[in-house]
C-alpha cells in the first residue's frame, strides 16, 4: 500500500466515524455537584456557579440530588478536595443514591484517578459534561469533527484512568513464574495513545482544509459587511437571528442548542450587502482545547465587521456573563472588533433589573427578540455602526432627477416632496455615499 492509499484509507475511516455518530448514552443518571471555594468567596457566587453546573448536568440528562462546596484556599494536589471532606461526601452519596460526583473545575488525570481509587466515588468534571452536551448536539460534519477533536485532546492524558478500571475489574496479570507483569491497561495505553494521536492529526488536517475553504470564501466576499451574533449560551441569539432573517433556526431552552454557525443575508436600509451569522454560545471556564478545536466555526467571529453581543438582561448574573464572553473574544483575537450590546429578554426582566442594566450600559439596545420589540431601533444602530448612517435633508433640482433612483436604491427615504423647482427629500444615507449628494444638502 503506497502513502496515498493509506491517506485515502484514513480519510474513509474518519468519515465512517462521523457518519456513524451516535448520541452518548449515559449510565449515570443521578449526581452530586461539588465546587471548591476560598474563604474570601461569597456564598452567593459559589451558589451561582453550582447552579450553572446544575443546568449543564440537566442538559446532559443527569438528575442532580445535591450541591456542595468545600472552603479551602488551595486545592489538594492529589485529590482536589480534602480527604475528610471526600469521605463525608461518599457517605452522603450512598445515603442519597447518587452514583456520580461532578466537579465544577477540570480535574487533573491524577486527581480523578485518586478520588475514584481511594474513595470509591465515580467522578467526572465540568469539561466532561460540556463535551457530552457538545457531542449530543453536534449535527453537521464540521461540528462533529470539532467535537471529536476536543474529545480526543481531553482523553489523551487520561488513558491511564480509563484503562485502570479495566485492570481493576479483571485483576492483576501474572506470568507462570509468579512475578507481576504489566497489566492489560498498561499495554493498551500505548496502543490507544498512538491511535488517538493519529486521529488528532487526521482531524486537524481535515479541519485545516475546511479553514482554507472559508478563507477563500472570505476573500470572495471581502466587500460584503459581516455581522456576527455572540453571547453567553442561552442568551437568545438564535431567537434574535430568526427575528431578523426568518431563518427558522432551531430554538431550544437548552445550553449549547446551537453549535454550527448559520449565515444568512440581512436586508438593511442601505444598498450594501450584509450577511449575519449565528454562533455557538460561550460559557464561563470554557475549556481552552474546546475553543481551539472550534477554530473553524469561530472564524465567523474573527472575520466580522460588527459583533452583536446578545445578553439575557433578565438574568441577575448578566454582568458576569458579559465579562466571560469578552474573555473568550480576547482569547480568539476578536476583542478589537466593534461591538453593539443587545440587552435581550426585556419581556422577562423585572423593572429593577432593567434599571441596573441601563445604568451600567447606557449605550446598549434593549429588545425582546421573542416578541420582536425594539428591533427597528437595533437596526438603526447597526446601520450607524456599519455604514456611518447620516440623516440629511437634500434638495434635488429637476435637472439632477437622475439621482432620485440612485437615492431610492442606496438610502432610506423618510419623506419626498415635489416642488416647483425640484424635489425636497429627507433621507438616511451611508456616510460612504454622502459625497454623491454633497452639493444638494440643505
Image: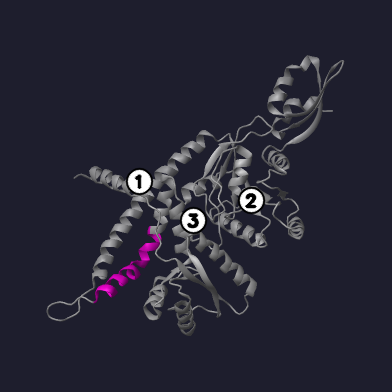
- Looking at the rendered structure, the secondary structure element under dot 1 is helix
Disc on res. 310: 2
Please state the horizontal and vertical placement of residue 189, each as a whole percent of the image: 28, 66
- The quadrant the N terminus occupies is top left
- Looking at the rendered structure, the secondary structure element under dot 2 is strand
Residue ID for mark 3: 291
The kind of secondary structure the magenta stretch mainly shows is helix
Q: Is residue 327 above or below residue 10?
A: below
The quadrant where residue 119 appears:
bottom left
- Looking at the rendered structure, the secondary structure element under dot 3 is helix
| Identity of the residue drawn at 35% across and 70% down | 161
Please give left or right for residue 257 compared with residue 341 in the image.
left
Instruction: Give the Cα distance between marks 2 and 1.
Output: 34 Å
Residue ID for mark 1: 19
Please state the horizontal and vertical placement of residue 188, each as a whole percent of the image: 25, 65
233 drawn magenta: no
Query: Mark 3 vs mark 1: which is more N-terminal?
Result: 1
- The quadrant the C terminus occupies is top right
The answer to whether marks 2 and 3 mark residues whose Cβ atoms lie closer than 8 Å is: no
| Identity of the residue drawn at 12% across and 78% down | 176
Q: Which residues are magenta?
A: 152-171
Amino acid at each position: 500500500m503506497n502513502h496515498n492509499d493509506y491517506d485515502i484509507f484514513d480519510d474513509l475511516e474518519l468519515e465512517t466515524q462521523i457518519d456513524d455518530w451516535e448520541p452518548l448514552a449515559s449510565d449515570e443518571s443521578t449526581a452530586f455537584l461539588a465546587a471548591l471555594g476560598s474563604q474570601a468567596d461569597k456564598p452567593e457566587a459559589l451558589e451561582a456557579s453550582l447552579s450553572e453546573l446544575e443546568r449543564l448536568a440537566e442538559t446532559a440528562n443527569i438528575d442532580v440530588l445535591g450541591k456542595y462546596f468545600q472552603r479551602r484556599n488551595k486545592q489538594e494536589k492529589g485529590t482536589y478536595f480534602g480527604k475528610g471532606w471526600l469521605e463525608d461526601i461518599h457517605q452522603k452519596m450512598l445515603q442519597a443514591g447518587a452514583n456520580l460526583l461532578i466537579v465544577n473545575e477540570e480535574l487533573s488525570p491524577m486527581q480523578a484517578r485518586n478520588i475514584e481509587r481511594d474513595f470509591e466515588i465515580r467522578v467526572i468534571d465540568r469539561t466532561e459534561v460540556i463535551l457530552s452536551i457538545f457531542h449530543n448536539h453536534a449535527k453537521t460534519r464540521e461540528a462533529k469533527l470539532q467535537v471529536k477533536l476536543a474529545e480526543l485532546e481531553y482523553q489523551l492524558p487520561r488513558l491511564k484512568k480509563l484503562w485502570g478500571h479495566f485492570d481493576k475489574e479483571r485483576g492483576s496479570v501474572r506470568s507462570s513464574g509468579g512475578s507481576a507483569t504489566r497489566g492489560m491497561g498498561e499495554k493498551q495505553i500505548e496502543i490507544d495513545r498512538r491511535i488517538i494521536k493519529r486521529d488528532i492529526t487526521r482531524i486537524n488536517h481535515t479541519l485545516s482544509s475546511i479553514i482554507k475553504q472559508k478563507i477563500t470564501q472570505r476573500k470572495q466576499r471581502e466587500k460584503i459587511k459581516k455581522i456576527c451574533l455572540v453571547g453567553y449560551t442561552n442568551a437568545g441569539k438564535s431567537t434574535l437571528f430568526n427575528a431578523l432573517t426568518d431563518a427558522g433556526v432551531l430554538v431550544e431552552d437548552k445550553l449549547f442548542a446551537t453549535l454550527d454557525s448559520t449565515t444568512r443575508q440581512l436586508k438593511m436600509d442601505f444598498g450594501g450587502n450584509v450577511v449575519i451569522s449565528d454562533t455557538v454560545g460561550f460559557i464561563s471556564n470554557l475549556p481552552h482545547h474546546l475553543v481551539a478545536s472550534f477554530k473553524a466555526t469561530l472564524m465567523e467571529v474573527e472575520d466580522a465587521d460588527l459583533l452583536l453581543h446578545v445578553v439575557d438582561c433578565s438574568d441577575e448574573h448578566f454582568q458576569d456573563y458579559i465579562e466571560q464572553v469578552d474573555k473568550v473574544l480576547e482569547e480568539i483575537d476578536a476583542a478589537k472588533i466593534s461591538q453593539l450590546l443587545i440587552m435581550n429578554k426585556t419581556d422577562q426582566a423585572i423593572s429593577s433589573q432593567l434599571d441596573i442594566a441601563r445604568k451600567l450600559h447606557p449605550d446598549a439596545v434593549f429588545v425582546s427578540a421573542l416578541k420582536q420589540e425594539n428591533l427597528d431601533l437595533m437596526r438603526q444602530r447597526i446601520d450607524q455602526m456599519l455604514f456611518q448612517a447620516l440623516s440629511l435633508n437634500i434638495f434635488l433640482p429637476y435637472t439632477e432627477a437622475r439621482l432620485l433612483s440612485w437615492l431610492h436604491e442606496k438610502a432610506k427615504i423618510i419623506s419626498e416632496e415635489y416642488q416647483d423647482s425640484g424635489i425636497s427629500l429627507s433621507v438616511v444615507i451611508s456616510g460612504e455615499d454622502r459625497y454623491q449628494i454633497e452639493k444638494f444638502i440643505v
